[in-house]
């Protein structure tokens, strides 16, 4: 933008801020390409650049009544745009951090929240199936789930039969 | 791809909202000015009514243009002169019965006259649209003065409201002649 054009735009901004509604189109048409060019230079993704330029333009018009007439209006517009660029960068950075955290958790072997939920649901389904079995099998399976070793041959066989019946019941219910 | 027409519509609407917000900020000043006669014993409903009318006029003028912003600022400051005078008179226990000449009425006239001179002086310093600036400042100053003097009664409001535009008009004449 040439210095003469910059002065023209600044004068139009002052006119618009002073209440001359006809100056709106001049200000809008002059500032949009300037802001878009600025945000496109500093944000590599086109959609982000357009988003930042739009937000900056709307913020500028929102505060146009408070325009400082002694300062350069175009520089003010670019300052607002730079804040929007920073906001978008910060948002993108935060999102990337969250994605990184999920990947790190998976790499460490720790359970992700959705895995924990699936595990919880599976356990509930197993307990419900066990509830369908005779009392003797339920007692045998409870000892198994509590990690208690089978004492004696009788208990071992009882546990084995209980597991067989649990498998059959599971197949009946869940296929 | 950005829809520039939609963006322009949004920007225009946003700018009007921004102006309206800026215009409404004057409510703080008007509420403070209205509290003065209210605390000094003016009728609350009359005071509230005048404050609401003054706020509506001031907010509209400020929303409309920069000229309105300047006129409201000057009008409120100059209208505060009769308001301050009324406060002093109330503090001295002076009363202003309607249609009777009294020291209180005279003081309110004098305060109105000072405000009137101030209105013309401020308008004369404007770089453009002096006539409109003078008129708008006069309207706001008169409304502020009326609100300020309401605690003393009609005997104070009328002299102030007569003196303010009369003196402002008299002071305006030489300025117009000089310009012509």
Image (spheres, rainbow, N blue to C red):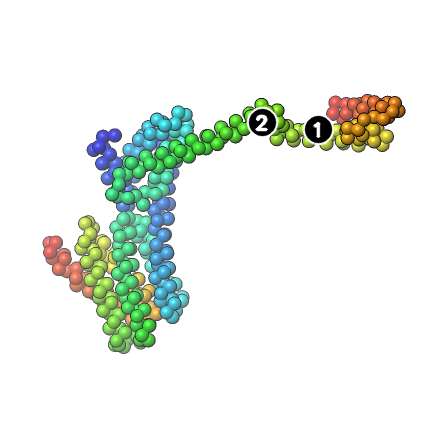
Q: Residues within 10 Å of mark 2 (few under 14, many from 20)?
A: few
Q: How many marks?
A: 2
Q: Quadrant of the C terminus of chain A?
A: top right
- Cα separation, mark 2 vs mark 1, equals 21 Å
Q: Residue at x 37, y 69 (%)?
A: B40
Residue at point 36% right, 60% down? B32
Q: Is residue B84 above or below residue A58?
A: below
- Quadrant hosting residue B14: top left
Please, is residue A160 above or below residue A61 in the view?
above
In this view, which residue lies farthest toward the right?
A: A154
- The image quadrant that residue B154 belongs to is bottom left
- Label 2 close to label 1 by CB (< 8 Å): no
Q: Nearer the viewer, mark 2 or mark 1?
A: 2
Which of the numbered marks, if any, corresponds to residue A105?
2
Query: In terms of secondary structure, where does tag 1 sit?
Result: helix
- The answer to whether residue B165 of the structure is visible from this angle is no
Q: Horizontally, is A19 left or right of B179 in the view? A: right
Q: Position of residue A164 (x, y in %)?
A: 82, 22
The residue indicated by pointer 1 is A122
Which chain does tag 1 point to?
A
Which image quarter: residue A108? top right
* Precedes in sequence: disc 2 or disc 1: 2
Query: Residue A76's x, y, as percent?
Result: 31, 38
Name the residue at 31% across, 51% down. Answer: B62
For residue B62, which numbered disc appears in the image? Answer: none
Is B151 or B5 nearer to us in this picture?
A: B151
On screen, residue B22 versus residue A107, left or right, reads left
On screen, residue A108 versus residue A37, left or right, reads right
Label 1 Cα crowd, 10 Å radius (few <14 / some 14-19 / many 20+)? few
Quick one: SS at disc 2?
Answer: helix
């Amino acid at each position: 933008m040439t210095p003469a054009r910059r002065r023209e735009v600044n004068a139009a901004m002052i006119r618009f801020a002073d209440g001359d509604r006809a100056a709106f189109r001049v200000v809008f048409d002059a500032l949009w390409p300037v802001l878009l060019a600025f945000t496109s230079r500093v944000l590599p993704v086109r959609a982000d650049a357009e988003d930042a330029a739009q937000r900056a333009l709307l913020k500028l018009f929102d505060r146009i009544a408070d325009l400082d007439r002694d300062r350069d209006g175009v520089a003010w517009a670019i300052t607002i745009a730079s804040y929007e660029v920073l906001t978008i960068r910060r948002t993108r950075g935060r999102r990337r951090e969250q994605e990184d955290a999920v990947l790190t958790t998976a790499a460490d072997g720790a359970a992700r929240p959705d895995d924990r939920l699936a595990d919880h649901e599976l356990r509930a389904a197993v307990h419900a199936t066990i509830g369908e079995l005779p009392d003797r099998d339920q007692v045998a399976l409870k000892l198994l789930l509590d990690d208690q070793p089978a004492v004696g041959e009788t208990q071992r066989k009882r546990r084995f039969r209980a597991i067989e019946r649990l498998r059959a019941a599971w197949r009946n219910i869940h296929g | 791809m950005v829809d520039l027409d939609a963006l322009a519509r949004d920007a225009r609407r946003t700018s009007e909202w921004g102006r309206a917000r800026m215009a409404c900020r004057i409510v703080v000043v008007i509420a403070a000015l209205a509290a003065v006669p209210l605390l000094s014993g003016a009728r609350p409903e009359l005071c509230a009514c005048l404050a609401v009318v003054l706020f509506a006029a001031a907010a509209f003028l400020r929303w409309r243009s920069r000229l309105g912003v300047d006129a409201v600022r000057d009008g409120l400051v100059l209208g505060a002169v009769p308001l301050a005078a009324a406060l002093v008179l109330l503090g001295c226990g002076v009363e202003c019965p309607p249609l009777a000449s009294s020291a209180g009425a005279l003081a309110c006239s004098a305060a109105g006259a000072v405000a009137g001179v101030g209105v013309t002086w401020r308008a004369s310093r404007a770089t453009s649209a002096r006539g409109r600036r003078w008129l708008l400042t006069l309207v706001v100053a008169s409304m502020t003065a009326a609100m300020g003097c309401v605690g003393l009664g009609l005997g104070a409001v009328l002299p102030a409201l007569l003196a303010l535009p009369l003196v402002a008009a008299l002071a305006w004449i030489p300025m117009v002649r000089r310009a012509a």
